[in-house]
Every structure is written in C-alpha cells, then in structure tokens.
Image (cartoon, rainbow, N blue to C red):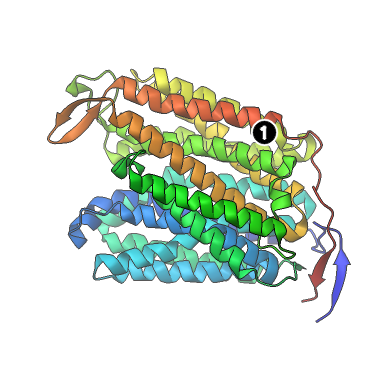
C-alpha cells in the first residue's frame, strides 16, 4: 500500500457519462431506503399490530428513527476512516439482514430487532453524498447529489401505492422482501459500478467520543419520541432529555480537548458549517412536521362537522401528494443544474421561502381539495433544500471530515425535526373538538397551529441561511491521504 497527498475533492475518475448515470442509479436504490422505511411500512402498521397482537406497533417507526439518528454520525466517521463505499455496502448488508428478520419474525420483539437493524439505512444518504463528492467527476457532482437527495419525491408518489399492492395481493411480509431485494441490488450495484473513495483520515478510534455521542443522542432522541406520551414537564422527559444534553455537553468538552477527536468540534462550530447544518435542519424539520400531520387532516371526514378534511383513504392521500412528489424531484434537478453557477446558499434561501409559503397555505387553505394539493406542492418544490444543504456542506467540509460532517447534519436534522413534530402533536392534542369512537377529531385551529409551527421553522431556516458566508469554499484545506487501490 502506498500513499500520496492530494487536494481535497480531486478525482482521477474519467468522465464516462453512461457509467456515472448507472452509478447514481444504484446509489439511489440505497438513498431511498430511509423514505421506504416510512412510506412502505406505515400502510402495514395496522396489519402488523394484528399479526403480533400488540398495541405498541408505533415502535416499528420509533425504533427505526431512534437507531438511525444515533448511528448516522458513527457510520459517517467510519466512512472517512475505512472508505465510504465499503462502509455504505456494509451498512446496506446489515439493513438487508434486518429486512429479512422483519419478514420472518414470529414475535414482536424479534421484529423490532429487525427494524433496529433497518435503521442503519438512515445513514445511507449522508454517506452517499460524501462519496459522490469524493469520487464523481466535478461535472456530475451537483446533479448527482440533487438526484440522490430529492429522489425521495419518487418514493412519495410510488411508495403508498406499492405498499397497498404488495399487502393486498401478497402479504405484509412482501413489503420487507421488496426492501430486501432493493437493498441487495443497491449494494451489489454499488460494489460493481461506484469506485471507492481514496481519501482517508488516519487516526485512532476515539471510543470515548463514539460512546459519549451515541449515549447522548440515544437519550435525547428517545426522550423526544416520548413527549406526547409523557408530556413535556414529566420528570421522565426532563431526566431523559436533560441527561442526554448533559452527556452531550461533556462529550463536546472532551472532543474539543483531545488530540484525535471522533468529531472535530472546531469544524462543527465554524460559522459556515454550523449555519449550513442548522438552516438545513430547520427547513427539513418543517417537512417532518407537515408530513406527520397532513394525512390526518386529509383523512378526516367533513361530515363530522369540521371545516377541513375530505375523508380520504390512504390511497386517496397518496393521490393528493403526487404533485408534491413530482416537484420534489424537480427541485433537486434545479439545484443540480444551477448550483455550479449560482452556488448552493441561494437555494437554501429560496427553498425555505417556498416551503414556508406552502406551509402557510396549509395553515389557512383547506376548504377545497385543490388548496392542500397546491400548498403541499409548494412544500415539495421547497424541498430543494434537501439537495442544497448537503451540497453546500460537501463544499465547505474538509475532505477528511465529509462523512462525519454529513452524519452530524443528519443527526441534528433528525433531532430538530422529531422535537418540533412532537411539539406540534402536543399543540394538536390541546385542540380536540370531539371524540368519535374514542378517536379524537381535532379542530381546524389545531391544524392551523401545526402548520404555523412549520412556517416558523422555515423562517428560522431563512434567518440562519442569511448568516451563511456568501463565499462558498472549504473551511479548512487539510492534507489528506489517498490510499492506492
């Protein structure tokens, strides 16, 4: 094995258009696993609850997001050290095993273990756009990141219909076998078509840093996930989240003082990187809030005496989201095409503004079917932030820290999105108009508050984005090691 120093972000890859199109295609099969983990599983929750005779089926979603938020920074850092393609494929295999376990699990406990393993798929997206930044030719990078991040629009359109088809014509297990097949094809295709990043960071494994960060994130994210069950002021909420924050503060001090930290706190606290991460996190969190509660609003029958809702089935809701899915993909393509000329910062601003406009429309316009369709369509177009944020971070972060930086962006975004979604749920629970068969029917005011929370998050994202330096450049020019393959 030999080594030589290179400038960050260089690539010896020869631009072969067909090869790189195929490469991004197989990577998308992996990056969409997170979205599939929600859109394919959500329609199956009722059937899974009956199969396992449990009232705790929501843990099928909770454990997926909880484990994903905890391991994403770790997987990103491992990619920086051992190779991003290698770590991405390894994580895909573990997630694949989780899918198989879920398909075959005879009991709920084993099923949840499988879902926990599937949670590793949350790390696919940040590792992928770091890998793209390392190995793709410069002329393909921006568009490839846009496609990888905003391909979620396709899943938004297809996922619910596909889940319904598999469940109705085969079985609930068929959903997990489908995810298994997609994971296998994506992992094999990545090995065959995507070159390994030759950029490495050579340092010891900071076990204290790894354990400290995972413990802090686990406590904070678990506490957030239980807010609606425990309430904000419950001692369990305060102890869990507070304990996590105390550990996080201690972790930060330790990482800042050690010579070979797990995460470079100087990088995370630098103005360009910090503002990029938090602007992205608040904008992305706004979509989490809206996506969590819009289906409930649409499915409520107008006959119950409310001035919103259309009594839609799950398939009916999916039809209302088609425009948003199409515009989500379009937003990613716009960023990919124009960011090389105008930079990414402007699209964080535009995306957050468009998304906030859509959220405002959802807050006050829900009496006619076209209103939520159009408003959520704007939210979909504003989702260009999903391409702009990671694209800008990959420009700013040093080559040796791209995986870890992307992982921290994912973890912070998950924490902010989950916290705000839980707070929105609390606000909604305070606005119950009536109970029908024990099921709460919320007032229009409750949904207005929910979507106004999303508006506020978009405003925060805009204000933070305005603080991002206009000069998009790498924060620190490191000397990195390229390992000859």
65 lies left or right of 260? left
Label count reads 1
State the image coordinates of residue 282 (x, y, percent, origin top left): 55, 36
- From the viewer's side, name the closer residue of 246 and 407: 246
Instruction: Please indicate, yes or no, whether residue 30 appears anywhere in the rendered image.
Output: no
* Vertical comparison of 263 with 3: above or below: above
362 lies left or right of 441? right
Residue 485 image-quadrant placement: bottom right
38 lies left or right of 46? right
* Vertical comparison of 309 with 105: above or below: above
- From the viewer's side, name the closer residue of 224 and 455: 224
Q: Residue at x 81, y 69 (%)?
A: 482
State the image coordinates of residue 90 (x, y, percent, origin top left): 55, 71
Residue ranking furthest to the left: 437
Residue 469 image-quadrant placement: top right
Q: Residue at x 30, y 63 (%)?
A: 173
State the image coordinates of residue 395 (x, y, percent, origin top left): 75, 47
* Vertical comparison of 31 with 433: above or below: below
Residue ranking furthest to the bottom: 1
Quarter holding the N terminus is bottom right
Q: Residue at x 50, y 38 (%)?
A: 285
- From the viewer's side, name the closer residue of 140 and 119: 119
Question: Are there few (<14), some (14-19), or many (20+) residues within 10 Å of tag 1?
Answer: many
Q: Residue at x 36, y 67 (%)?
A: 113
State the image coordinates of residue 411 (x, y, percent, origin top left): 55, 51
Of helix, strand and loop, which one carries label 1?
helix
Instruction: Please indicate, yes or no, whether residue 410 appears anywhere in the rendered image.
Output: yes
* Vertical comparison of 36 with 467: above or below: below
Q: Which residue is mark 1?
A: 347
């Amino acid at each position: 094995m030999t080594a030589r120093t290179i400038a960050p972000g260089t690539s010896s890859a020869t631009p072969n258009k067909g090869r790189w199109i195929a490469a991004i295609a197989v990577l998308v099969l992996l990056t969409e696993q997170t979205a599939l983990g929600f859109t394919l599983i959500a329609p199956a929750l009722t059937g899974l609850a009956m199969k396992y005779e449990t009232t705790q089926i929501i843990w099928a979603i909770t454990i997926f997001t909880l484990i994903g938020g905890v391991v994403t920074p770790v997987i990103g850092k491992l990619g920086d050290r051992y190779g991003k393609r290698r770590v991405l494929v390894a994580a895909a295999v573990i997630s694949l095993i989780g899918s198989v376990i879920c398909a075959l699990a005879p009991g709920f406990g084993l099923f949840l273990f499988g879902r926990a393993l599937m949670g590793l798929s949350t790390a696919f997206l940040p590792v992928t756009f770091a890998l793209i930044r390392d190995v793709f030719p410069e002329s393909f990078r921006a568009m490839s990141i846009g496609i990888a991040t905003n391909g979620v629009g396709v899943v938004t359109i297809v996922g619910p219909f596909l889940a319904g088809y598999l469940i109705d014509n085969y079985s609930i297990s068929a959903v997990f076998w489908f995810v298994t097949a997609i994971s296998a094809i994506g992992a094999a295709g990545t090995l065959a078509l995507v070159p390994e990043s030759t950029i490495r960071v050579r340092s010891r494994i900071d076990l204290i840093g790894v354990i400290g960060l995972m413990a802090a994130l686990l406590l904070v994210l678990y506490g957030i996930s239980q807010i609606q069950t425990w309430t904000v002021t419950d001692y369990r909420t305060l102890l869990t989240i507070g304990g996590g924050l105390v550990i996080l503060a201690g972790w930060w001090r330790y990482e800042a003082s050690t010579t070979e930290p797990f995460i470079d706190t100087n990088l995370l606290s630098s103005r360009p990187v910090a503002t990029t991460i938090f602007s992205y996190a608040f904008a992305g969190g706004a979509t989490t809030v809206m996506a969590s509660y819009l289906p409930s609003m649409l499915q409520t029958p107008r006959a119950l005496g409310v001035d919103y809702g259309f009594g839609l089935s799950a398939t009916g809701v999916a039809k209302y989201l088609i425009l948003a899915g199409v515009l989500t993909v379009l937003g990613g393509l716009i960023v990919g095409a124009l960011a090389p000329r105008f930079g990414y910062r402007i699209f964080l601003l535009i995306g957050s503004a468009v998304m906030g406009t859509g959220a405002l429309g959802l807050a006050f316009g829900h009496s006619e079917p076209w209103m939520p369709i159009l408003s959520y369509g704007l939210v979909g177009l504003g989702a260009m932030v999903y391409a702009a944020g990671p694209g800008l971070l990959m420009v700013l972060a040093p080559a040796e820290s791209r995986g870890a930086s992307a992982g921290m962006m994912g973890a912070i975004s998950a924490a902010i999105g989950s916290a705000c979604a839980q707070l929105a749920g609390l606000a909604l629970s305070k606005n119950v108009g009536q109970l029908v068969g024990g099921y709460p029917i919320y007032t229009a005011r409750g949904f207005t508050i929910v979507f106004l929370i999303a508006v506020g998050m978009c405003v925060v994202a805009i204000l933070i984005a305005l603080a991002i330096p206009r000069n998009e450049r790498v924060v620190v020019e490191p000397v990195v090691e390229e390992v000859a393959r």
